[in-house]
Each structure stands twice: as structure tokens, then as C-alpha cells.
Amino acid sequence: MKELTVTFLGTGTSGGVPSIGCSCEVCRSSDPRDKRLRCSVLIETESTRLLLDCGPDFRQQILPFPFQRFDGILLTHIHYDHVAGIDDLRPFCVFGDLDIFANQSTVNSLHSTMPYCFTEHLYPGVPRLRLHVAEKHVPFSIGDIEVMPVEVMHHQLPILGYRFGRFAYITDMKTIADEELPYLEGVEVLVVNALRFAPAHHSHQTVDEAIAFARRIGARRTLLIHANHHIGLHAEVNRLLPEGVELAYDGQVIRV
């Protein structure tokens, strides 16, 4: 696979940071790395452009970038903070219908949450969506990017993470079955969710749980996402993290 450019459009939890109504030091911070929109990334090669998750901040996130087609949109699951921006994709339909890849339950739910996109007679301007079911362990290609879906558990909800060669992106995970681990063997750069240091959460990993998972699969570099304001100030968190682990931030660009 060719070199990937990964741009973090958002690294925050479902409510974003600052948190509405909060005056903690993180929410009052002037460090732009402490401002966290809802989780989403761009994954690009010279010829292919993918969007991974499309939450309620999508419009704000994408405006600074050149107006170019998406070759595919990958969804991890149906929760609002990961799909609420899909309607804002409608301007990109000038390039053609939008190909969206998700597991079966997410595909089914999109028909319920956005029924106006799937009627027999679409009204003018509605986003034109082509839904594709992505099955765990069944690889597929979009342009020159090969995608391997893996399944993780968001409490009791099976959701998808995605592997792209030596790079993997997993969000909203609490646990993962042992049988999924072979599909992450050889991953060197891992993006994974870490809500806060403590206390434990029923459906999200803590920082310690995320680090333990990264070590379990042998990732060389790990970037933590889906963080809330309780995690602490970005600069201080990174001083606490072990070598090879860092707190990602909105606007960060890495190459794999």
C-alpha cells in the first residue's frame, strides 16, 4: 500500500471539548490542542480520499480543506457523534453518488435515521448515498487503499474498526475478542479511544486500558482519541504517557 496521510479532523468524545456549561481548566484552556471536535479523520493517498466517520462537526471540520470528492466514507457505528454530519455531505454529490461503508446494523439504521435519502422519489438536493455492507475480516479496496474491517465491542454493541496496512483506527471500543487480534497483527501505528484516566467507563476505554491494548498488539506508535475534558490538559497528559503513546489533537497530520 502507498503512504497514507492521516489528518485528525476531530479527537473528542460525544459532547466535544470544551464541554457545554463547564469551566474546568481544560474547557478554559487557550491551547488549541485542548479544543476537541467529534471524532473523524481524513485518510489520503495521492489518488484516493477517504472520510472515516462523519459526525455533527463535519461542516466545520471540512471547510478549511479543498473541495474535492470523497472516494468512500467509512462508518464505525450509528451513534449520533459519528453519523450526524452525513446530510452535510450533499455538496460533494456534484462529484457523483457517495459510497458509504458500514456494518449491517449501521446500514439498517441509516434507513431509519435518514429515510428521506432512500425513498423512491428523492427530493432535489437530498444527498445521494450508496450503502455498502462492510463485513468483519472481509477486506475490500477503495482506490489504492485496502481496508480490513475488524469488530470491537462498544459495551454490548458490535462496531467496526478499520485496518489499512500497518495502520489501524479504532474508536469507541471497550473490549475486543481474542479472535480479532490476528487481524491486527503487524499494526505499527494505532489510533484508539481513551476517554479519560479514571474512573472506568462501561463502554469506553480508559487511558490505561488503551495503553494495555496497544502493547497487546505490539503497536510502535499509539495516538489516543475520543478524549473528554476529564483527561486533562494536552501538554500535561503527554508528559504522563509512556514512550510511543501520545494524545492526538485536532488538525494533527501523520504519515504511515
Image (cartoon, grey):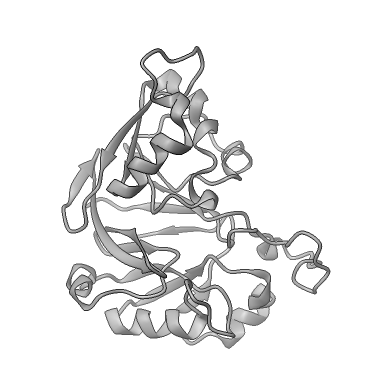
Relative to 31, 41 lies left or right: left
Instruction: Pick whichever, 108 or 5, lies toward us.
Output: 108
Q: How many marks?
A: 0
Q: Residue furthest front?
A: 112
Give residue 248's position: percent from left, percent from top.
54, 66
Query: Of 165 and 213, which appears nearest the observer?
Result: 213
Q: Residue at x 25, y 38 (%)?
A: 143
Q: Position of residue 54 (x, y in %)?
A: 49, 44
Query: Is residue 46 shown to the viewer in this render?
Result: no
Q: Quadrant of the C terminus?
A: bottom left
Against 47, residue 216 (above or below) is: below
Residue 205's spot in the image, x, y percent? 47, 76
Res 214 seen here: yes
Hey, which quadrant is residue 96 in on the image? Answer: top left
Q: Is residue 136 above or below residue 235?
A: above
Q: Give the answer, above or below, for where 184 lies relative to 133.
A: below
The residue depicted at 74 percent of the width and 71 percent of the height is: 26
Q: Which sits in the foreground, 193 or 245?
A: 193
The spot of residue 237 in percent (x, y) is 62, 80
For the point 22% across and 78% down, which residue is it?
Answer: 178
| Residue at screen point 58% across, 69% down | 227
Q: Is residue 121 left or right of residue 194?
A: left
